[in-house]
């Protein structure tokens, strides 16, 4: 095992291969507060990539209702149990990662779901932690709650799937950090399925190979965001590129949200993979639950997010989510307008921070029809 | 203890000359009988001596097999001078021949050095510059060869499928356009990965130059057939006689067995080290 640096846990850790960061790292921010659980993303992915034979059960993108939802069953609970919950000391993780806790003979601590574990993809859907009594009034955080957690492969900096494969059939592309299973080389040992703590590699029994989210790389190569991003009804997603914290640039939307504002956090950073999908935590959920899931930055992130109305840059950048199919590597705000540009500063998209409001007469005399105004 | 008693008893029977089973050898001896039969039940197998190969867990490279499973495999071998047939027989009360998520299949393999040399390659999948050839039999492929279909319904009879885009009414069934569309949803097929099939044989020929380097041979020429016995598998693998192997020449052979119910695949397997392999002259 090599020693590598993982900024998300604030320390060095052991990994199967030495540190080798790609020239650019694909990353994403999902604003959980805006997700409506419509599963349009799930279907967008399903129709694009996994409508084949042997892929019937696969959801490269899934959306589960937390706290009870999980696909496959108990994926997160099993891992937390394996790591004894994991112990943080401030921003430094003192517990073991899945690489460090690997038992003798294994490359990572893992487990392999069986077919039944995939049989209930939306278990716990919309299940609240408890009954909200009549007459109760809600304050933040809510006394009873649930939220939607949309999940894709995290295209981790230290992928456990890649580390687990004894054949080296999984690779991380140096040009964009996307993690792929070489479908010509894979022999279906399912070691990656066992190793990925997020359970985002799936075995195809009919092709005999393991398959996973490819971050729609043919689109990324054209400067376009993946299907689950552009089809997102709630406009909760933004794809882009993330720098190392010491190289963060404010004009990079992902850097700004993750490194500068620290409003978006990795999912289970304590696993040790440096996952590259970052979540803006839901403000209505009690922080202890969220800290376990997104690490020690939760309270600060929630504070920052709640303060967005007083923070024109942050609220401006949040307007870029779901505003264009293009990947926006740079952004800037000018007054009430937000610009997304390419690396050279050429405008890709322009968004007003406030939609213009038109109030129409309740009765349209010309067409002789009653009109409704939507706020 | 019981095992030792059985072995002692067997040896006594053998010593008294009233042996009923075949001769046990301390190396794998391929009897030249003018035949390398594919059928595990072929009577020619009666003429082959038997070798008891003790299996060890693969515990040299990660991921390892930490818990031993199949303890031993009985090996017989026959040759016709061109091909060499191995019959592997082991106890495995439950057949695991259906692949699935978290589900693994039974299998076995025969490994020989690519070249007969004074110093043999590393028995664990060979080494750089000293390749080994592996003929690999899998129970799921055997099931396909025996006629099991290749759809999700064949694995999960109650599965219900709404629609596959490549089976849309607008596409003529079996047409090039339908195939191209199906391939889009099966990248391993598009890449020519032989794991996809067609599974006309339950055996695949592979080459390796060390752990993790196993790759398909240019083509599969080996054949195989596996059948269930009352308590396990009996599998014949027929491959080309290693080049240069003849009476008075020795090479090596190694065997591996994968137990599906123990989630064995790839590096997680029971295996032997090198065992001398000789050819016995025709009488
Ligand atoms: S989320 Fe899982 S499948 Fe994706 S890169 Fe990380 S370890 Fe691999
Ligand atoms: S499409 Fe967007 S809003 Fe709908 S479930 Fe997916 S992430 Fe949530």
Image (cartoon, rainbow, N blue to C red):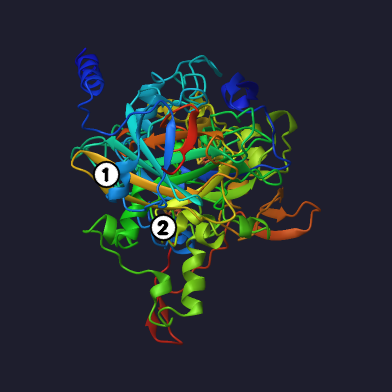
Query: Of all residues shown, which one is farthest toward the right?
Result: A344
Q: Mark 1 lies on which chain?
A: A
Question: Which sits in the foreground, B22 or A163?
Answer: B22
Quadrant containing the N terminus of chain B in the rendered view:
top left
Left or right side of B155 for A334: right
Q: Does the residue labelled 2 lie within 8 Å of ligand 1?
A: no
Disc 2 secondary structure class: loop
Please give the name of the residue rendered at 57% of the width and 63% of the height, measured from the top-left corner: A356
Question: Which sits in the foreground, A22 or B230?
Answer: B230
Q: Identify the residue position indicated by label 1 in the image.
A: A116
Q: Mark 2 lies on which chain?
A: B
B161 in relation to A149, above or below: below
Disc 1 secondary structure class: helix
Q: Position of residue B86 (x, y in %)?
A: 40, 43
Left or right side of A159 for A68: left
Task: Tell me the CA gap for discs 2 and 1.
Answer: 30 Å
Marker disc for residue B201: 2
Give the number of the mark in front: 2 or 1: 2
Marker disc for residue A142: none
Counting every numbered tag in the picture gives: 2
């Amino acid at each position: 095992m090599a020693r590598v640096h993982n900024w998300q846990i604030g320390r060095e850790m052991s990994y199967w291969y030495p540190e080798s960061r790609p020239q650019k790292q694909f990353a994403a921010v999902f604003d959980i507060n805006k997700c409506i659980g419509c599963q349009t993303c799930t279907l967008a992915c399903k129709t694009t990539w996994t409508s084949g034979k042997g892929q019937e059960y696969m959801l490269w993108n899934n959306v589960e209702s937390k706290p009870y939802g999980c696909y496959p069953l108990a994926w997160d609970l099993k891992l937390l149990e394996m790591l004894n919950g994991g112990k943080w000391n401030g921003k430094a993780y003192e517990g073991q990662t899945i690489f460090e806790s690997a038992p003798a003979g294994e490359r990572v601590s893992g487990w392999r779901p069986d077919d039944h574990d995939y049989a209930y993809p939306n278990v716990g859907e919309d299940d609240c932690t408890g009954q909200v009594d009549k007459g109760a009034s809600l304050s933040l955080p809510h006394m009873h709650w649930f939220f939607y957690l949309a999940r894709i492969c995290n295209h981790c900096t230290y992928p456990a799937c890649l580390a687990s494969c004894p054949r080296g059939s999984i690779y991380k592309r140096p040009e964009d950090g996307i993690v792929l299973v070489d479908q010509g080389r894979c022999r279906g040992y399912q070691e990656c399925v066992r190793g990925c703590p997020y359970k985002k590699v799936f075995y195809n029994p009919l092709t005999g190979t393991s398959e996973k989210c490819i971050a729609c790389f043919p689109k990324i190569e054209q400067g376009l965001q993946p299907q689950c991003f552009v089809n997102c009804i709630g406009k909760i997603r933004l794809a882009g590129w993330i720098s190392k914290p010491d190289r963060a640039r404010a004009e990079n939307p992902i850097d700004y949200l993750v490194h500068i504002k620290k409003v978006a956090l990795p999912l289970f950073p304590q696993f040790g993979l440096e996952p590259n999908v970052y979540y803006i935590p839901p403000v209505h959920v009690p922080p202890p639950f969220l800290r376990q899931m997104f690490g020690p930055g939760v309270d600060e992130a929630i504070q920052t997010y709640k303060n967005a109305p007083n923070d024109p840059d942050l609220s401006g950048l949040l307007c870029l989510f779901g505003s264009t199919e293009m990947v926006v590597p740079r952004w800037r705000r000018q007054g009430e307008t937000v610009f997304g540009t390419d690396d050279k500063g050429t405008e890709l998209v322009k968004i007003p921070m406030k939609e213009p409001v038109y109030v129409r007469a309740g009765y349209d005399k010309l067409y002789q029809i009653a009109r409704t105004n939507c706020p | 203890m019981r095992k030792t008693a059985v072995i002692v008893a067997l040896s006594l029977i053998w010593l008294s000359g009233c042996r009923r089973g075949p001769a046990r050898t301390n190396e794998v001896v391929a009897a030249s009988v003018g035949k390398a039969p594919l059928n595990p039940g072929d009577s020619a197998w009666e003429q082959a001596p038997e070798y008891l190969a003790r299996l060890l867990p693969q515990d040299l490279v990660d991921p390892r097999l930490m818990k031993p499973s199949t303890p031993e495999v009985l090996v017989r071998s026959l040759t016709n001078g061109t091909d060499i047939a191995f019959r592997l027989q082991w106890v495995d009360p439950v057949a695991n021949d259906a692949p699935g998520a978290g589900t693994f299949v039974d299998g076995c393999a025969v490994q020989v050095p690519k070249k007969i040399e004074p110093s043999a390659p590393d028995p664990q999948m060979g080494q750089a510059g000293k390749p080994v050839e592996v003929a690999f039999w899998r129970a799921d492929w055997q099931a396909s060869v025996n006629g099991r279909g290749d759809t999700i319904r064949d694995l999960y009879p109650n599965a219900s499928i709404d629609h596959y885009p490549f089976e849309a009414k607008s596409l003529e069934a079996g047409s090039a356009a339908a195939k191209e569309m199906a391939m889009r949803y099966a990248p391993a097929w598009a890449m020519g990965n032989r794991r996809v099939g067609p599974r006309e044989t339950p055996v695949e020929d592979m080459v390796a130059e060390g752990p993790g380097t196993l790759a398909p041979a240019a083509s599969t020429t080996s054949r195989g057939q596996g059948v269930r016995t009352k308590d396990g598998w009996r599998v014949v693998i027929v491959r080309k006689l290693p080049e240069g192997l003849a009476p008075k020449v020795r090479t090596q052979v190694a065997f591996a067995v994968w137990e599906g119910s123990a989630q064995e695949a790839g590096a997680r397997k029971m295996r032997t080290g090198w065992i001398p392999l000789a050819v016995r002259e025709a009488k």
